[in-house]
């Protein structure tokens, strides 16, 4: 919630503009998440659900997870933190802190997606479906 409140502030102060714009682009993966949910709730078309599971996993990986490593590299090696800290006020620093939270949440949700995929499509799940 705090991130959503601080994003307009960050944009108006010209701070953290690139990460905030990136977060808006990441919503592209939500289309497949919502379609996947609709197919799951209908209970029909299991092959179509597998297609949407795969497309969602791919888009989430490419759009949300892989850029996290790039952002960590930029933050660790390409940002002049002493200069940034000298020229920033308290609210700028708070906004900078909250910009990192969605990156962390994307990685956390990705771990949950992988666990769910292993349960649903792992070897045990496939052999149990064949036995029934």
Image (spheres, grey):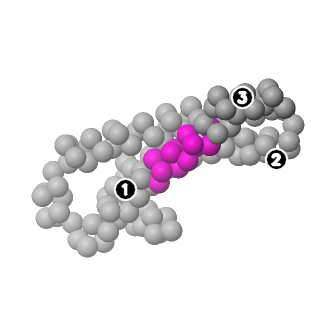
Which dot, 1 or 2, sits closer to the camera? 2
Q: Is residue 85 above or below residue 40?
A: below
Which dot, 2 or 3, sits closer to the camera? 3
CB-based contact (under 8 Å), mark 1 and mark 2: no
Q: Is residue 10 above or below residue 18?
A: below
| Alpha-carbon span between mark 1 and mark 2 | 33 Å
- Between disc 3 and disc 1, whose residue precedes? 1
The secondary structure type at the circle numbered 2 is: helix
| Alpha-carbon span between mark 3 and mark 1 | 38 Å
Q: Position of residue 77 (x, y in %)?
A: 19, 43
**Residue 16 vs residue 75: left or right?**
right
Instruction: Indicate whether residue 108 is drawn in magenta.
Output: yes
Residue 99 is drawn in which quadrant? bottom left
Residue 131: tell me if it is visible: yes
Q: Main secondary structure of the magenta part?
A: helix
- Between disc 1 and disc 2, whose residue precedes? 2
Q: Residue at position x 78%, y 43% from top? A: 40
Q: Is residue 85 above or below residue 44?
A: below
| Alpha-carbon span between mark 2 and mark 3 | 21 Å
Mark 3 burial class by Cα count in 10 Å: few <14, some 14-19, many 20+: few
Q: Position of residue 101 (x, y in %)?
A: 41, 58
Residue nearest the observer in this picture, 98 or 40: 40
Q: Residue at position x 21%, y 66% from top? A: 88
Q: Residue at position x 55%, y 40% from top? A: 114
Instruction: From the image, tell me which residue sits under label 2.
Output: 41
Identify the disc placed on residue 126.
3
Report the magenta residues as a range: 105-117
Instruction: From the image, tell me which residue sits under label 1.
Output: 100
């Amino acid at each position: 919630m705090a991130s959503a409140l601080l994003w307009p502030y960050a944009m108006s102060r010209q701070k953290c503009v690139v990460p905030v714009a990136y977060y808006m682009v990441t919503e592209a993966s939500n289309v497949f998440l919502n379609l996947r949910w609709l197919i799951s709730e209908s209970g029909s078309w299991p092959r179509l659900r597998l297609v949407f599971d795969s497309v969602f996993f791919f888009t989430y990986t490419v759009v949300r997870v892989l850029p996290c490593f790039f952002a960590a590299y930029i933050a660790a090696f390409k940002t002049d933190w002493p200069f940034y800290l000298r020229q920033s006020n308290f609210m700028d620093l708070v906004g900078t802190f909250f910009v990192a939270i969605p990156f962390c949440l994307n990685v956390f949700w990705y771990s949950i997606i992988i666990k769910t995929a292993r349960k649903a499509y792992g070897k045990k799940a496939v052999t149990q479906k064949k036995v029934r």
